[in-house]
Image: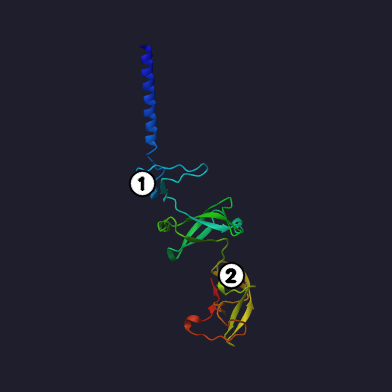
Amino acid sequence: RQAACDAARADVTQAQARVQATKVEQDRTILVAPFDGIVADIVGELGEYTTPSPPGVATPPAIDLIDNSCMYIEAPMDEVDTPKIHAGQVARVSLDALPNQVLAGHVKRVAPYVVAVEKQARTVDIEVSLDNAEDIKKLLVGYSADVEVVLESHSNVLRVPTSSVLEGNKVMLYQPATQKLEERAIQVGITNWEFTEIIEGLKQGDQIVASLEREGVKAGAVVTAESNNEKPSKAIGK
């Protein structure tokens, strides 16, 4: 009789263990979000089983959850420029989705390692936060963006379009007296994709050729204005 009681107790213990194991498995079917956010994607359907990935390969998440309370822009920078960039620097952000708008921001973080090697070019990711809360609301995860970090800025300077500067720091200057083009050497200061600072070689109001790719643009060429919209560019103070 004692043996039967012991066997019954063992059966009860095993049954309790099976119940506990079933509860553990049941708990694994419930996913709890680790933070507030937006569900971007759900992988799979109701009732499906998740197939584990091979060893060393991460299992894809069942749900892609986006934390939209901390939006920022991530951009690759050439390793040559990275030593000049640090957290806190002013940045300007342009989005394809928001044409003709430049959003103000600042560098939030510079990655301490090279993250990509493409065609022998090594890049380092930086993170940029927008300064205006209203601008942040315009962002959607996945937007493409161009980021320009301001390394240095000068005010009250003479500047010309960067596209108008020839190799070797020269411009095509229009001489109204002769209506001809003259190749003029200039000394430049800081520059970006849009404008180049002029230190010497031009004065405010000088007219230069902005469309250097046009046929016939060379020193000594006679200039004829085709319309009011095609006059040579002017060197401007800013």
Where is residue 25 drawn, in percent x and y? 39, 34
| 210 sits to left or right of 9 | right
Residue 168 picture quarter: bottom right
Residue 89 picture quarter: bottom right
Tell me if residue 229 comes above or below residue 187 in the rendering: below
Tell me if residue 8 comes above or below residue 215 in the rendering: above
Depth check, mark 2 against mark 1: the one in front is 1
Residue 161 visible within the image: no
- Could you tell me which secondary element the residue under label 2 belongs to? strand
Label total for image? 2
- Could you tell me which secondary element the residue under label 1 belongs to? loop
At x 53%, y 69%, the residue is 194
Q: How is the image coloured?
A: rainbow
Residues under numbered marks 2 and 1 in contact, where contact means CB atoms less than 8 Å apart: no
Residue 24 visible within the image: yes
Asked whether 110 or 65 is in front, the reply is 65
| 140 sits to left or right of 160 | left
Q: Amino acid at mark 1?
A: Glu
Residue, disc 1 = 45
